[in-house]
Image (cartoon, rainbow, N blue to C red):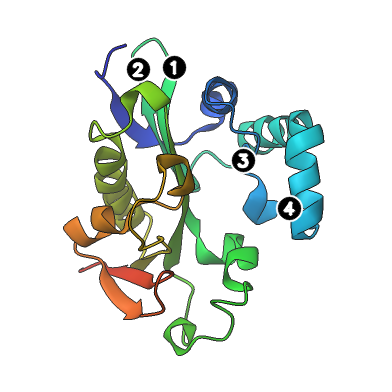
Amino acid sequence: MTTELTCTQLAPRHAEALAELFDRNKSPCYCRYWHFEGDKNSWLDRCANQPEASRAELVLSESSQDADELRGVVAEEAAGAIRGWMKLTRASAVPKLYAQRLYRGLPCFEGDRTHVFTIGCFLIDEPLRRTGIAQRLLTAGIQLARDAGAEAIEAFPRRVDNVPAEQLWTGPAELYDAHGFALVNDFAPYPVLRYTIDR
């Protein structure tokens, strides 16, 4: 499998190829968790019994979005297959993330949030994990966020040892450390990290 990839902003034309990335990796969430309105048990039931509903939502949502709005970064082969994904969107687009008990009402989230973006998740094709694709997605994402007028990017990794790769879906803490993200709320194993974009 080739690693000749281009990291680019998610566009409506990527919708089906992005869904196929989730298909190949048997990931039933299809990046819909932060947009799902039910409770945790309802979400688990949907993943187990109705993953096709999440897939359909992903394809419909992404194929009909404004192409200029930053909602994520894809690692794409020349033939069009997507081998990696990073959800990167405005913080206001993922209120469910910030409403979680761990993060609700934290002082680090006070003030004007208009130009704050959030990293919601990563998914890399299993054969290509630990080959630097997540790093490339993040590097591209920082530049794309800067171009979109972002003033900061927030991330929510798990900072624990010996975690299986499939449980690092918000990105490994070491990845963010290497890119200069700063700790703004220290609650191990769930820190809040922020990258401030210089203008």
- The amino acid type of the residue labelled 3 equals Gln
- Contact between marks 3 and 4 (CB within 8 A): the answer is no
Mark toward the start of the polypeptide (3 vs 1)? 3
- Residue under label 4, please give it: 36
Q: Compute the Cα span from label 4 to label 1.
A: 26 Å
Q: Which mark is residue 65?
A: 3
Secondary structure of the residue carrying numbered label 2: loop
Q: Compute the Cα span from label 2 to label 3.
A: 22 Å
Which of discs 2 and 3 lies nearer the camera? The answer is 2
- Contact between marks 1 and 2 (CB within 8 A): the answer is yes
Q: Quadrant of residue 50?
A: top right
Name the residue at 64% across, 73% down.
Answer: 99
Tell me if I can see residue 70 in this picture: no
- Residue under label 1, please give it: 81
Question: Where is the C terminus found, in terms of image quarters?
Answer: bottom left
- Residue under label 2, please give it: 77
Mark toward the start of the polypeptide (4 vs 1)? 4
Which of discs 3 and 4 lies nearer the camera? The answer is 4
